[in-house]
Amino acid sequence: MSSALTDLFPHPIVQAPMAGGVSVPGLAAAVCEAGGLGFLAAGYKTADGMYQEIKQLRGLTNRPFGVNLFMPQPETADPSAVGVYAHQLAGEAAWYETELGDPECGRDDGYDAKLAVLLDDPVPVVSFHFGVPSREVVDSLHRVGTFALAAATTAEEARAVERSGADAVIAQGAEAGGHQGTHRDHPETGGVAGTGLLSLVAQVREAVSLPIVAAGGIMRGSQIAAVLAAGASAAQLGTAFLATPESGAHALHKDALTNPLFVRTELTRAFSGRPARGLVNRFLREHGPYAPAAYPEVHHLTAPLRKAAAKAGDAQGMALWAGQGHRMARDLPAGQLVEVLAAELAAAGTALSEYATGGTGR
């Protein structure tokens, strides 16, 4: 990774921006103070809400941090399919004594307004999910001193990130929790497609000359060492930080990561209409097979259901986003977790060096 970007965070550890209230300022600040790169998630927030969180984060740390934006989505959803899904969810609405949300209440996530704030009051790093910003947007960020990153789930998408002029690509493997950052959601994939992280890093490394931030199922320092050895410059971790006390995740969500009731994860469109990895619960099992490829329509439709389930203390109706390594989650403060990960990374490097020189690696 370019030395200017690397110098922003001493440890090659990036805290993933998790939308929906998880990546709060306190979490990002703790990661930054420990030598990682903390991120705020602007997704699902207003431009002013994002700005207020940035102000709060600046009051907690003087270290560099990042802000993540969702790209506006094209109108590709079939309204009739959304209507059918709404009919299927009627029983959920009755059970939780709430109304379904309006699927047509917005699809650009306030992108232009948020970008205007970030150009007027720049932050060190901005990353993009669900697509690639235009060359003009990237150039405007560079002019105000901001590094630009964008997610990719294939080598082809990584090439698009490189063409945009971005400074690095976030290679997101299928193991990652939450939404896959695919640039276009293809209905024929059924929400289950994806390439494993190590294979993806290798493919992206051969496809582009950009630095790579590897994301997907990483929970230990030894895994960070593995992606660095594969060609990445840093690792991005989400689920590992979701379990920390600083995270804004619901207590039921944190508990579910290691609760034996939730034994596996799946990619599903059940909650949002876009492929996203979450713990398999009742809602995912019952509705995942029928959810249409319709984001953000399905996200808006199910929002009141998810909120009501959380209020009722019912994890079986919540979107429990989690990566495949969720059972390895550790209940540690975020800053301490960064330190432990860095120590594990160093130990893995020592073991590898000893092996390469004929030692025992222990």
Image (cartoon, rainbow, N blue to C red):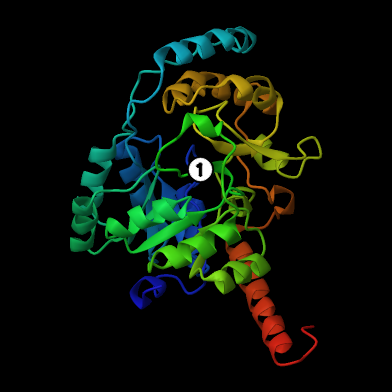
Element at label 1 = loop
Q: Residues within 10 Å of mark 1 (few under 14, many from 20)?
A: many
Residue 62 figure quarter: bottom left
Q: Residue at the location (34% across, 33% down)?
A: 73
Residue 104 image offset from top left, x and y in percent: 36, 18
Residue 41 image offset from top left, x and y in percent: 43, 45
**208 with respect to 16 (left or right):** left
Determine which residue is flagged by label 1. Answer: 180
Residue 294 figure quarter: top left
Q: Is residue 161 above or below residue 285?
A: below
Residue 87 image offset from top left, x and y in percent: 54, 7
Q: Is residue 70 above or below residue 213?
A: above
Residue 295 image offset from top left, x and y in percent: 43, 28
| Residue 99 makes an appearance in the image | no
Residue 183 figure quarter: top left
Q: What amino acid is labelled 1 in the image? A: Gln
Q: Quadrant of the C terminus?
A: bottom right
